[in-house]
Image (cartoon, rainbow, N blue to C red):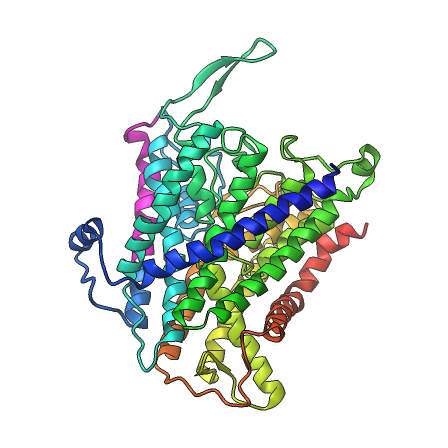
Amino acid sequence: MSDGWAAALFIVTLVVAWAVAYRFLGDYLFRVVTSERHCRVERGIYRLVGVDAGSEQNAGAYTRSVLAFSVISILVLYALQRLQGHLWLDAGLPGVESHIAWNTAVSFVTNTNWQAYSGESTMTHLTQMAGLAVQNFVSAAVGIAVAVALIRGLARSRSDLLGNFWVDLTRLVIRVLLPIAVLGTIVFIAAGMVQNLTAGTEITTLTGGSQTVTGGPVASQEVIKELGTNGGGFYNANSAHPFENPTAWTNWLEIFLIGLIPFALPRVFGRMVGDKRQGLAIVAAMGVIALASVALLNLVELAHPGTVPTAVGASMEGREVRFGTGNSATFAAMTTLTSTGAVDSFHDSYSGFGGGVTMFNMMLGEVAPGGVGSGLYGMLVLAIITVFVAGLMVGRTPEYLGKKIGAREIKLASLYFLVTPFLVLMGTAVAMASPEQRASMLNTDMHGFSEVLYAFTSASNNNGSAFAGLTVNTWWYDVALGLCMVLGRFLPIVLVLALAGSLGRQAPAPASAGTMPTHTPLFVSMLVGVTVILVALTFLPALALGPIAEGLL
């Protein structure tokens, strides 16, 4: 079978699996977030933290809860890293340096999982388990909870109550993320992934030398790393390491886990607003963009552009032989279309256009299907912008699901869209204007610019993947990228929850002959068009200076 047909079969099986999960996991998620019953473990947690599970929060209280939980999480994770050399399972590793500890704490709490360090030689097993893995669970749950709060704002009438953040967080971790993670861990251990607490094993290499192979709780972290669209690897090589991703079928399973919850959440949206067609329209828009991106990246990389790849008939630099070019390209597309950031190949080794596709995926706002929760609420904000544009075209007050999109709503939606472009472009401009920061670039041509642009795009969109060649483990980059992660995560969340409260206070307007249906192929095509065009207009000049210029050489 040719590489092209093998890549196509790989993609088709993923699409079929996600289609099945859309129905069954989506229905289960709907029952989780709408149930009025609490299990015994959940009730114990509520008593421990002093939460009244029967009360709901308005937009302000929900927002304060999200921010308070996140601030405490950053402080705890920072302290754990700094003190790890004095705690259990330290394996002789010292405390993490302050600027790296700050960057890492912010990274994992914001679901970015950007790593300015080598995991196996920097973090102890305790930090990996009690710090990083825990944040993989709860940061993912925060994203889903915010998406559900926005749906409640769209579904409810004359009420700005959006549910209870602490209840949503607890349920999503205990009823959704933990069960799937436990099952996935068993499968990954059976596949050959490492799961132990050893400090390392001395082995004799083929050349007769000795090497220490680091062990650890890898399989359990690998599952939630993908399931929660986190991306932080136990090893520096991430999912290219054989202990994290040993075979081609585990590579398929990791990609499946990345898209599992983001593709299922639109089903929850459709059921909560009482019209399953609305969920189908959103997932269709996500699917069209995702399929186009995956196909384009495969096409570019399988064509092996460039003098050396053309001469040898393959584009295998920076790829694992056990995955090949096609499967690696699919992995790269899905991790940048979501907020995962995991890698099983070297994005820096991709062709100019290939690297540009991965950047464009993140610049879309990671909405196709996006991160767990963040992808759905990002696409819903774009849907609101789309109906506003459509309303201007026909001269009517725009409505979405019976809620009028007035000045307040469109301002919040517009500010949401502008946050990450501002962070990406300003961060890149400041770095390129500073001789000291340009000195961190290994390449000084357009590829070096692409490395800087990729770094700020990844951090501001809470992705976490990176081009190589840029030395980001410096005080300036650790602080600057950390600030981009914080602002890129929490400013949009604040705006989304404010939007949810504003929509929830409205009474739904009855549909009329002039109401634009938002479940039709016409609306799906408009939503896709608005999403792509807005990003193209915003980022095309920057892309032209980097990956496009490189691809045209």
Above or below 151: residue 230 = above
Chief secondary structure of the magenta span? helix
Please state the horizontal and vertical placement of residue 335, each as a whole percent of the image. Answer: 56, 48
Answer whether residue 83 is magenta in the image.
yes
Q: Which residue occupies 52% across, 46% down?
A: 256
Q: Residue furthest top?
A: 208
Judge left or right: residue 470 versus residue 485. Answer: right
Whether 110 is drawn above or below 385: the answer is above
- Whether residue 413 is in magenta: the answer is no
Query: Which quarter shows the N terminus?
Result: top right
Residue 232 position within the rendered picture, expressed as x and y whole percent measured from the top left = 47, 42
Q: In the drawing, does residue 78 fall left or right of residue 211?
A: left
Where's residue 412, x and y in %?
46, 75
Residue drawn at the location 20% of the way across and 62% of the way down: 53
Q: Quadrant of residue 270?
A: bottom left
Left or right: 312 in relation to 263: right
Residue at 32% x, 72% y: name it: 59
Given residues 151 and 487, the one toward you in this image is 151
Q: What is the x, y in percent for residue 30? A: 37, 61
Q: Which residues are magenta?
A: 68-90
Against 186, residue 387 (above or below) is below
Nearest the eye: 460 or 285: 285
Task: Decide which of 142, 54 is in the foreground and name it.
Answer: 54
